[in-house]
């Protein structure tokens, strides 16, 4: 099945969801997020036993939320935007079967957050990963304040978010942000093999294992994500947000307060 910017393909029991907005390095706009939500639901209905998320092309997994769209958002618009991103990340996280992010290039901001919502992450050697929202005058708004510290620990997550650090694939693996780094040309075959191994496991047992592991975070995460949504949206009323996004779109360094 395909939408304008999203494709869903099945190979036996393995579904692959590909984001394809090459003119914006697969950055996520409203249309793409809505298509992702539909594709995830479709993969569930069709009984996928592993779901792979990746980006089209050789440069980007997902370069983030669409900055051109975000630039003019009001606080209430940013809250709805935060809600939409959260709903897609939550749909990935609560997908019944295991999910894998095949990180084939830039995974920034909302792109990193979609990868964080997957169960496992495999990166190509040339991937670069991070949450650089601070340099746009905002904070991560689709779950990284909660899901990133879980993987990399509190200190490393604070450094990444406060400093907007962009990690190369090897550093991301050392930090615990990805489970495996492979040569670019081996990413697809490595992920396929991993997806097949997961799909061949007893279905009820692996899905129960996933739900059981997720219990660790479930109760406090919903409240924390709600806090993040309001905190993210609140920054859309600041000079720094307007300056940060304008500077990116005008290809210049921002001048913050
Ligand atoms: N949103 C919208 N457009 C984007 C984009 C984004 N996140 N990232 C890249 N693009 C667009 C660029 O504007 C450019 O478009 P034009 O050709 O029309 O000018 C095109 O994609 C190619 O990008 P660059 O020319 O910048 O390519 P590059 O190779 O020089 O740099 C990059 C690549 C390092 C990924 C750089 O594009 C970049 O830093 N992108 C932004 C990354 C970022 O800050 N992401 C976080 C977004 S905020 C967020 O996601 C909030 C949240 O938590 C919900």
Image: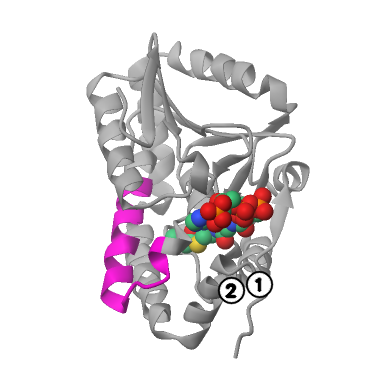
Q: Give the secondary structure at mark 2.
A: helix
For residue 252, which numbered disc appears in the image? Answer: 1
Quadrant of image for the C terminus: bottom right
**Quick one: 197 or 238, which is closer to the camera?**
238
Q: Position of residue 32 (x, y in %)?
A: 35, 44
Instruction: Give the residue displayed 66% in from the left and 63% down from the top.
Output: 160
Q: Position of residue 19 (x, y in %)?
A: 44, 36
Q: Earlier in the sequence, mark 1 or mark 2?
A: 2
Answer with the quarter of the image where residue 194 lies.
top right
Q: Is residue 177 left or right of residue 231?
A: right
Q: Which residues are magenta?
A: 69-90
Answer with the quarter of the image where residue 188 lies.
top right
For residue 243, which numbered disc appears in the image? Answer: none
Main SS class of the magenta portion in the image: helix
Q: Is residue 78 left or right of residue 23?
A: left
Q: Is residue 67 left or right of residue 90?
A: right
Q: Which residue is mark 2?
A: 247
Instruction: Give the residue displayed 38% in from the left and 28% down from the top.
Output: 7
Q: Is residue 150 visible?
A: no
Instruction: Give the residue displayed 65% in from the left and 24% down from the top.
Output: 187
In three-dimensional space, the C-alpha distance between marks 1 and 2, rounded to whole angstroms, equals 5 Å
Answer with the quarter of the image where residue 143 lies.
bottom left
């Amino acid at each position: 099945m395909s939408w304008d910017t999203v494709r869903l393909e099945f190979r036996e029991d393995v579904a692959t969801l590909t984001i394809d907005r090459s003119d914006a390095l697969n950055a996520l706009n409203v249309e793409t997020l809505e298509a992702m939500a539909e594709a995830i639901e479709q993969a569930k209905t069709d009984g996928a036993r592993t779901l792979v998320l990746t980006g089209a092309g050789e440069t980007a997994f997902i370069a983030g939320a669409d900055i051109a769209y975000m630039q003019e958002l009001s606080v209430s618009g940013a809250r709805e935007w935060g809600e939409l991103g959260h709903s897609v990340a939550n749909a990935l996280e609560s997908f019944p079967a295991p999910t894998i992010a095949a990180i084939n290039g830039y995974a920034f901001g909302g792109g990193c957050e979609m990868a964080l919502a997957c169960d496992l992450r495999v990166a190509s050697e040339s991937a670069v990963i991070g949450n650089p929202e601070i340099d746009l005058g905002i904070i991560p708004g689709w779950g990284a304040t909660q899901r990133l510290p879980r993987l990399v620990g509190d200190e490393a997550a604070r450094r990444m978010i406060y400093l907007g650090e962009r990690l190369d694939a090897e550093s991301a693996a050392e930090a615990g942000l990805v489970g495996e780094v492979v040569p670019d040309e081996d990413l697809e075959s490595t992920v396929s093999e991993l997806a097949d191994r997961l799909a061949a496991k007893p279905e009820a047992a692996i899905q129960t294992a996933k739900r059981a592991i997720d219990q660790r975070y479930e109760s406090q995460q919903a409240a924390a994500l709600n806090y993040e949504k309001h905190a993210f949206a609140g920054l859309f009323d600041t000079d720094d947000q307007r300056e940060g996004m304008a500077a990116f779109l005008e290809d210049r360094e921002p001048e913050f307060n």
